[in-house]
Image (cartoon, helix red, strand yellow):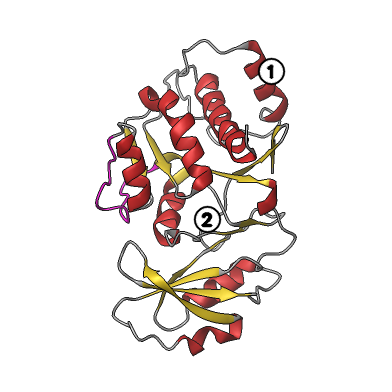
Amino acid sequence: MSDKYNAAEGAYKIICHELYKLNIYKDNIKENLREDLINKIDKAPSIFKGLRDGGSIRLFENIGIGTGSTADQFTEHFLPKLKKYFKNIYSSSKKTTEKLESLGFNVANAGKEHKCDIPLDFYVDGADEVDKNKNLIKGGGGAHRNEKILAKKALMFICIVDTSKIVNELGKFPLPVEVYKSFKYYDHELLTVYGKVTPRNEESDRGNPLYDLHDTNICDDPHITEIQICNTKKVWDVGLFTAASKKPDIVVIGNSRGFNLL
């Protein structure tokens, strides 16, 4: 199996384990799966610890799905196994909605992928770069604004990547910036302080212009760079996921042997 598949399987196992610990997951779980979960996941404290109060069990209902080739591995191979455990599935892009609907899923925010008005239990998505502190660059597909909305709504944001996405410092991958569509002829010179700017031919799902920053000058604290770019005149959002918005709770790194956690 590919590294992306193994990362997606890691996310599936994490979700199964959370369901299992709350006595929600009732399917037969192979012993080797449980051993794998115990060895790799149990060492980390559960985000859902304490949800069982007064003998009642909080049932999972909502999951969000990201955009990109690694997220597609999760959607195609593992989300169908979890379908009966979730009442609502939220999509981060038109492309993801099409993928989900082609697999027979009902998408709660179809046609309104920029909206999510309820808390999500899980959000599963990939990334273009991940540093050691779990800061991300996302948005190679131009869906970073919608992805950020869903990530912020999630109790557990699981980021799934292969080893090629792990970097010492963010910035080598082009950093996407979305500007308001009312500024079609945006003066992108405002962004040159952060790196070389190139416009994209395509627009975001919202119809907004997209730009890429190359060899981005990201400071030692990426969340400061995220705040600074978002505060730049006419900028709608940037593809940085840091403490200023939402970092993943767990990063699953797929490799030839399976997966590791960050």
Residue at 45% across, 52% down: 152
- Residue 185 % position (x, y): 35, 86
Q: Is residue 144 magenta?
A: no
Instruction: Please report the residue visible at 60 percent of the width from the left and 12 percent of the height from the top.
Output: 30
How far is disc 1 from disc 2 in space, using C-alphas?
Answer: 31 Å
Per the image, label 1 sits on a secondary structure element best described as helix
Q: Which residue is mark 1?
A: 35
Q: Nearer the viewer, mark 1 or mark 2?
A: 1
Residue 94 relative to residue 247: left or right: left
The answer to whether 54 appears left or right of 135 in the picture is: left
Residue type at mark 2 is Lys
Q: Which label is found at residue 22?
A: none
Quarter holding the N terminus?
top right
Residue 168: image quadrant is bottom right
Mark 1 vs 2: CB contact within 8 A: no
Say if the magenta span includes residue 108: yes
Q: Position of residue 73 (x, y in %)?
A: 50, 38
Q: Is residue 49 visible?
A: no
* Residue 107 placement: quadrant: top left
Magenta span: 106-119
User: Principal SS element in the magenta part?
Assistant: loop
The residue under label 2 is 246
Q: Secondary structure at mark 2?
A: loop
Q: Amino acid at mark 1?
A: Glu
Disc 2 packing (10 Å; few <14; some 14–19; many ≥20): many
